[in-house]
Image: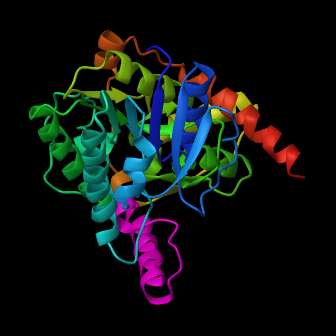
Amino acid sequence: MNPANVFVTGATGFIGTKLVNELVRRGHTVQALTRATSNRQNLEHENIRLIQGDIMNKDSLRKGMEGCTHVYHLAAYAKNWSRDPKVFFDQNIGGMRNVFAAAKEVGVQRVVFTSTIVTFGPTRRGEVGDERMPRITSHYYTEYEESKAVAEQEALSYAASGFPVVIVNPTRVYGPGKMTEGNSVSLMIDMYDRGKVPVLLNGGVNVGNYVLVDDLVRGHILAIEKGRIGERYILGGENVSLRGLFRLIDEVSNKRHFQISLHPKIAMAYGYEELLKAKVFGLYPQITPGWVETFLQDWAYSCAKAERELGYKITPLREGIKMTYEWVLQQRKNHR
């Protein structure tokens, strides 16, 4: 893609900050949507223009997109919990509609919409899913999952009517960057190494797919350059069980960490206790029953379509975990 003016929502998040800086490094000018309260760290560059606004504010979206030819819509409500579940649907569906409406009005050439792997649903034990796999369950484990699934189907409908949108589905993201809730895997690596999270839920047998944030950022850029309108592209890495992930952390750290297997019933009870405290006292929960259920499933997926059509490449998981672990150690030194 030739140098262009690009609009990015979710620009202050873990993935968004990395994407904005990579776009600038490639010669693009970025108009980044930020809230007044957002952490704007690492968004200082002459080719980054910060636009104060919100995906629920249509005027700020139109203003932000003025002069832009391409849009990345990353912003979403992706938290564990909200006192009002309606927030997930308002922001993840309504916010997407607002972004698409503004893009249509301004006349942008292409939009990349960041969805999530959970819209495809879990995979059966021993199977690896892809973009063609129908959901094996009609059940949604969390409001986040349901709202993103509805938004994704709407995005596909927009594409069918001619709107130039490409959808990307990231898996579990990790890597150096802002240590926010969106970077929960890196937070887990840090806490596991400190001995604070030695828990292997269900013995650590359930499989997830893990993507290095730098690969994911490059995948977004490839999607806008080469992605086919109305297509979904899984942007992930390697499939590994939680036990296997912890084993990799042990290997790269040259340390043996204490581990304890947590029975699903105990984990669910803890999730309900956290949810009760959230509802009664307003204390933000570490996890909810829906997220416990999510992590008790397998989420094994292939990125073959993105590799084939976009030229997407995966950093080996061991290499990515080593890089992240070394970065975590450096952060500890910096904050002593």
- Is 77 on the left or on the right of 161, as rendered? right
Magenta span has 23? no
Numbered marks: total: 0
The percent coordinates of residue 139 (x first, y second) are 17, 56
Q: Nearer the viewer, residue 15 or 139?
A: 15
- Is 194 on the left or on the right of 269, as rendered? right
Q: Nearer the viewer, residue 254 or 140?
A: 140
* Residue 122 in sight: no
The chief SS type of the magenta part is helix
Q: Residue at x 87, y 45 (%)?
A: 334
* Residue 285 in sight: yes
Q: Residue at x 15, y 43 (%)?
A: 136
Q: What is the quadrant of residue 300 in the picture?
A: top left
User: In the displayed image of the protein, which residue is found farthest to the right?
Assistant: 336
The percent coordinates of residue 258 (x first, y second) are 68, 49
The percent coordinates of residue 66 (x first, y second) are 41, 40
The percent coordinates of residue 327 (x first, y second) are 74, 35
Q: What is the quadrant of residue 104 in the picture?
A: top left
Q: Nearer the viewer, residue 108 or 19?
A: 108
- Is 150 on the left or on the right of 265, as rendered? left
User: In the displayed image of the protein, which residue is found farthest to the bottom?
Assistant: 280
Q: Which residues are magenta?
A: 264-292
Q: Where is 277 relative to 324, above or below? A: below
Q: What is the quadrant of residue 189 in the picture?
A: top right
